[in-house]
Amino acid sequence: MRTAHTVDTVRRAEAELMARLPEGTLMQRAAAGLTAACAELLRSGSGSGGGRVYGSRVVVLAGSGDNGGDALYAGARLARRGAGVTAVLLAADRAHPGGLAALRAAGGRVADDPFDALDTADLVLDGITGIGGHGGLRPDAVPIARAARGSRAVVVAVDLPSGIEADSGEVPGEALRADLTVVFGTEKPGLLAGPAREYAGTVRLVDIGLGGILPSVPALEALQHLDVAQLLPEPGAASDKYRRGVVGIVAGSARYPGAAVLAVAGALRGGAGAVRYVGHATDAVIARFPEALVHAGPPGKAGRVQSWIVGPGLGDDLDAVAEVLAAPVPVLVDADGLRRLAAEPALLRDRAAPTLLTPHAGEAAALLDTTREEVEAAQLAAVRELATRYGATTLLKGATTLVADPDPRTPVRSNTMGTPWLATAGSGDVLAGLAGSLLAGGLSARDAGSAAAYLHGLAARRAAADGVPVTSYEVADALGRAWRDVRETGGS
Ligand SMILES: NC(=O)C1=CN([C@@H]2O[C@H](COP(=O)(O)OP(=O)(O)OC[C@H]3O[C@@H](n4cnc5c(N)ncnc54)[C@H](OP(=O)(O)O)[C@@H]3O)[C@@H](O)[C@H]2O)[C@@H](O)CC1
Ligand SMILES: Nc1ncnc2c1ncn2[C@@H]1O[C@H](COP(=O)(O)OP(=O)(O)O)[C@@H](O)[C@H]1O
Ligand SMILES: [K+]
């Protein structure tokens, strides 16, 4: 499990640890981890450095705080290994004194012209701001950050990409996009939530000894293979199709029969014992999936289920939404079902069984009575607000998918397993089917949503492995492979 803690929590834990250690120890641990990561990158040939630390050209962008200190000490270590290291000081009179002295003692120098230095750099260390930065890059840092990004150098962010908000994942102004972020002690929420997450590149965690001090419940977490493997249901010797769970799907319409087919496709790969389709697309569903049980409706007449999915491709025939939400089983509401809910939130008022809402940014905006742009700029705040306002677990789809429970103390789950290939019509229907199927298998709404988002992203990656566009149907088809992948790596 990847975990992220807020800035306040990190600062408290660091203070507690620092009180037990000689001064400067944590910064040296951070700098040592940073140096190792940079050396590895340079040796791998990234940034056209010729595959060695010795002789490579490194530029350290150093702001006025400890983030700059980390970067300067790492620069000093790289200089001792033979790199040519130049520092660009964003606030020359307030640069970290110890870090700057160490760099100079190791043969590093301060740049006369930052742009000349960046022009020939192989690697740029971004130490402008860390967890103390707010409000985006300041005007004097903007041209330097742009030159760094525009150069051929590989960019390594120290703790987090400068310009992002560590706690909210918002990017209020300009920020410096990194190829690698070396984060200290624990991840920060902004590394797991969009839009900031998309600035971080690959994230590498350096242990600085905070492990036993940080609270065990993080602010955010992200599942990995092993975690997903442990969540997935597995039939036992005593299982029959009803015990494995029956998922009911109210989706599709004469106008959008494909949404029904795709939701059923996802649900059939989610481990439920049976998939019961209810609606106007029975012919299309049965033609593709003879194993589905079909019924023209209404849902109450279709037979028992352990969970319902309602919404994909329903069009304007939305009476079934209220009917399904009145059932005492877990319900996943997607697409047109969410439109109905935005118009009548009271439909959720008397629900005792779990509810999972799966909006994309546009649907989330309608539910929150705001704009898509505002949701996209503050995804973490939006998903939390949706979950508390509607009293329902909410999965907010996007390049990063977030899942929040109504109880604000429960860590938000982030899924970074997606791929832009998923931005294709109908892939959300497959996700809804898969998540609803996991709900029928007995997973909580949070586990079902986050495990489904993970498998869905992994399936798309597998299906697009050759770099070719994938269709939503192919994503559904690759779910079996994704399931096998996590089981093989995670054990079962
Ligand atoms: N604590 C620990 O034990 C450890 C901490 N570690 C490291 O310390 C980092 C946190 O250091 P920090 O607290 O000094 O804050 P930091 O992010 O460097 O910013 C400092 C100053 O920058 C300025 N500034 C603000 N916004 C700005 C902007 N938009 N653009 C430009 N400048 C801006 C503002 O100063 P101002 O100019 O307003 O006076 C602010 O005070 C942390 O991320 C990690 O790398 C590690 O060594 C491990 C041990
Ligand atoms: N850039 C992206 N990177 C990763 N995943 C993405 C990206 N864009 C969209 N997705 C994923 O693709 C799916 C799209 O779902 P949705 O918006 O409901 O589409 P549709 O309604 O066409 O099915 C979601 O799972 C979303 O998280
Ligand atoms: K930084």
Image (cartoon, rainbow, N blue to C red):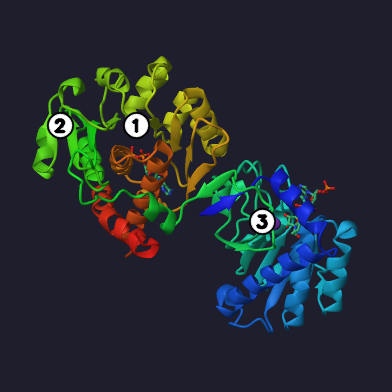
Q: Is residue 140 above or below residue 294?
A: below
Of the two numbered discs 3 and 2 on the same chain, state the one appearing first in sequence.
3
Q: Are marks 3 and 2 in contact (CB under 8 Å)?
A: no
Residue marked by disc 3: 212
Residue marked by disc 1: 334
Numbered circle sitting on residue 281: 2
Q: Are marks 3 and 1 in contact (CB under 8 Å)?
A: no
The residue type indicated by label 1 comes to: Asp
Viewer-proximal residue among 389 and 210: 210
Ligand 2 within 8 Å, label 1 CB: yes
Distance from disc 3 to disc 1, alpha carbons, whole Å, reads: 40 Å
**Residue 309, position in %: x, y?**
29, 32
In this rendering, the label closer to the viewer, 3 or 1: 3
Distance from disc 3 to disc 2, alpha carbons, whole Å, reads: 55 Å
**Residue 277, position in %: x, y?**
18, 33
* Residue 477 seen by the camera: yes
Viewer-proximal residue among 279 and 370: 279
Q: Is residue 76 above or below residue 67?
A: below
Of the two numbered discs 3 and 1 on the same chain, state the one appearing first in sequence.
3
Q: Quarter of the image holding residue 64?
A: bottom right
